Amino acid sequence: MTSNNVDVVIVGGGIVGLATAYYLGKQGKKTLVIERDAVGSHASGFAYGALSPLGGDGIPGPVLPLTIEAMKHHQEFSQSLPEETGVDIQYRLKPTLSLAFEEEEAQRLKDSFAWQQKQQGYKVGWLNAQEVNSLEPRIAAEALGGVYTEGPAEVDPYRFVLALLQASEKKGMTIRHGDVTGLIEDGTGLKGVKLGGDQVSCHEVVLAMGPWTIAASNWIGMPVPIEPLKGQILRMNWQGNAIDCTVGWAGNYASTKPDGLVWAGTTEEFVGFDETLTVEARNKIMSSVLKIMPSLESAELVQQTACLRPYSTDGLPILGPVPGHKGVYLATGAGRKGILLGPVMGSAVADLILDGRTDLPVEPFAPGRFSKKPVA
């Protein structure tokens, strides 16, 4: 068995894995990240990069306290990462406008006011049709109104991953490429991981392979019920003025990013590990976008991307120690909120490794919820 003189092996070079390496490195732990492809070459590098903590799966509910904490991590990173690496991660506050075209949609949005308006640091209000038009005259006249939220933000996902990579390397992280095919354990705990025909020694491992973490089900003898949720995004050149807020409807959105392009999405496709770009997705996205803002019909498609988000069967992250496997941790399942939740998930796992506990609100996401095995 080879030794890389590292304390922790992290399988997966996406945002969760790199964030884990970063926080462990801050405390002097040497980490080895094992990535099959290029770092950030899947969901982490091709996401939209929205930081919107007040909506999505598990919100309101168990995910909300985690997303609130996640924003604090991003606010800190917005200062520290550019200083440490010189990489502009393009963090900026970006209001959101969630539109309603039917009375039922409007009522659902209004029903969320009670708890959304209680969240410190966010300003949430209902805009009627006239107010929507004043904010953004190019929105379709058929819109009945929408919820306008100040407090969300965005980053460039690829730049963010690049900055995390560079900062983590400065803190002692190294990278190897290849396929991890299993764990090496005995009666006392973890001894290492199988990497192709090689073996890498370690006493702790973090499995953060996005939807590919399902492969770990066979390694740990319990289900890791995760599957890929494919999402496609269009980047378009448009001669109109910038869309200064993220305008959304029914899970779709359009906004101008710092690159000057309008980014529009997205799809939710359960098609396995298929990252093929499709005409069907492009047409579906454009249909939704044109309902939101008809004048985007003149936009020119520049790039279409696809990524596979890790989505668990109950829609919640899978985060924490694996029951019955000392030194083994899971960190996956952030779904459409991978960029938002990635840093706080990495911070939580680092806490668990360093201290055996964390003050972050991760109890609802314990892997043990899928197994009746006792915690080691």
Image: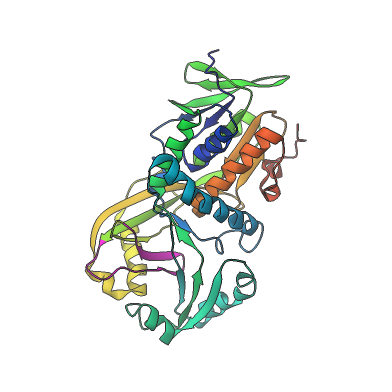
Residue reaching furthest to the right: 374
* Horizontal side, residue 232 vs residue 61: left or right: left
Query: Residue drawn 54% across and 46% down?
Result: 343
Percent of width and height locating residue 321:
67, 36
Percent of width and height locating residue 179:
46, 26
Is residue 249 positioned above or below 202 on the image? below
| Quadrant the N terminus occupies | top right
* Horizontal side, residue 269 vs residue 117: left or right: left
Is residue 226 positioned above or below 168 on the image? below
Residue reaching furthest to the bottom: 130
Percent of width and height locating residue 312:
57, 48
Is residue 198 positioned above or below 43 on the image? above
In magenta segment, residue 257: yes
Q: Which residues are magenta?
A: 237-258
Query: Residue drawn 41% across and 58% down?
Result: 267
Occupied quadrant, residue 39: top left
Percent of width and height locating residue 36:
43, 30
| Quadrant the C terminus occupies | top right
Query: Residue drawn 40% across and 55% down?
Result: 48
